[in-house]
């Protein structure tokens, strides 16, 4: 017998139809400035539950934290990022949504770092361009309909 997940969304399947995903993506800005930092395990422990994201790479631990957290803990960072969340619940196996979104941003020379989580896709864009990126993403469904 398969073990059941204890997650809140057990049994909820995300959308996989590209046209529906694009039409319903409804990007939302998450308030704040975020930074990517490379840290060691001691620093990770001192951060407690403040990291928005943590990933272990062979070179070190990458965390994404609010800028004020990095400053408080004297963590080094290079750039600040805004965060946009695509509010459509996308299936992790959906094909084409991120290509559509990242190509539109690339056409406007906006870099993007994407994180796909269980329910949504999250886009880190340069903080100085977060409003431009939001406008571009909001226009994608209209451009596909035409």
Image (cartoon, rainbow, N blue to C red):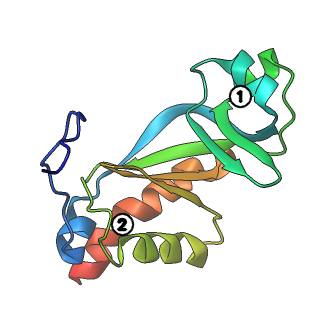
Q: Residue at x 27, y 68 (%)?
A: 22
Q: Of the residues under marks 1 and 2, which one precedes in the sequence?
A: 1
Residue 62: image location, x then y, percent: 72, 44
Identify whether 125 is placed above or below 83.
below
> 40 or 132, which is in the foreground?
40
Residue 33: image location, x then y, percent: 64, 34
Identify whether 80 is placed above or below 145.
above
Residue 53: image location, x then y, percent: 57, 39
* Label placed on residue 86: none
Residue 131: image location, x then y, percent: 53, 49
Give the quadrant of residue 80: top right
Q: Residue at x 41, y 47 (%)?
A: 85
Give the quadrant of residue 10: top left
Residue 34 lies left or right of residue 77; in this view the side is left
- Report the quarter where the C terminus lies: bottom left
Q: Does the CB distance between marks 1 and 2 fall below 8 Å? A: no
**Which residue appears farthest toward the front when viewing the image?**
1
Q: Can you identify the residue that label 2 sits on?
A: 139
Identify whether 61 is placed above or below 89.
above
Which of label 1 and label 2 is nearer to you? 1
State the CA–CA distance, disc 1 to disc 2: 29 Å
Mark 2 Cα shell of 10 Å, populated few (<14), some (14-19), many (≥20)? few
> 15 or 45, which is in the foreground?
45
Q: Residue at x 26, y 62 (%)?
A: 91
Q: Secondary structure at mark 1?
A: helix
Identify whether 1 is placed above or below 4.
below
Q: Secondary structure at mark 2?
A: helix
Mark 1 Cα shell of 10 Å, populated few (<14), some (14-19), many (≥20)? some
Q: Can you identify the residue that label 1 sits on?
A: 67
């Amino acid at each position: 017998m398969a073990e059941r997940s204890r997650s809140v969304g057990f049994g909820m399947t995300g959308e996989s139809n590209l046209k529906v995903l694009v039409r319903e993506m409804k990007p939302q800005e998450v308030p704040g400035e975020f930074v990517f930092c490379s840290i060691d395990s001691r620093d990770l422990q001192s951060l407690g539950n403040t990291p928005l994201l943590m990933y272990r790479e062979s070179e070190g631990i990458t965390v994404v934290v609010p800028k004020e957290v990095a400053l408080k803990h004297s963590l080094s960072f290079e750039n600040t990022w805004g965060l946009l969340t695509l509010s459509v619940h996308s299936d992790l196996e959906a094909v084409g949504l991120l290509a559509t979104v990242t190509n539109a941003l690339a056409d406007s020379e906006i870099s993007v770092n994407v994180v796909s989580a269980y329910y949504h896709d999250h886009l880190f864009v340069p903080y100085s361009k977060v409003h431009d990126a939001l406008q571009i993403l909001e226009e994608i469904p209209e451009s596909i309909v035409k």
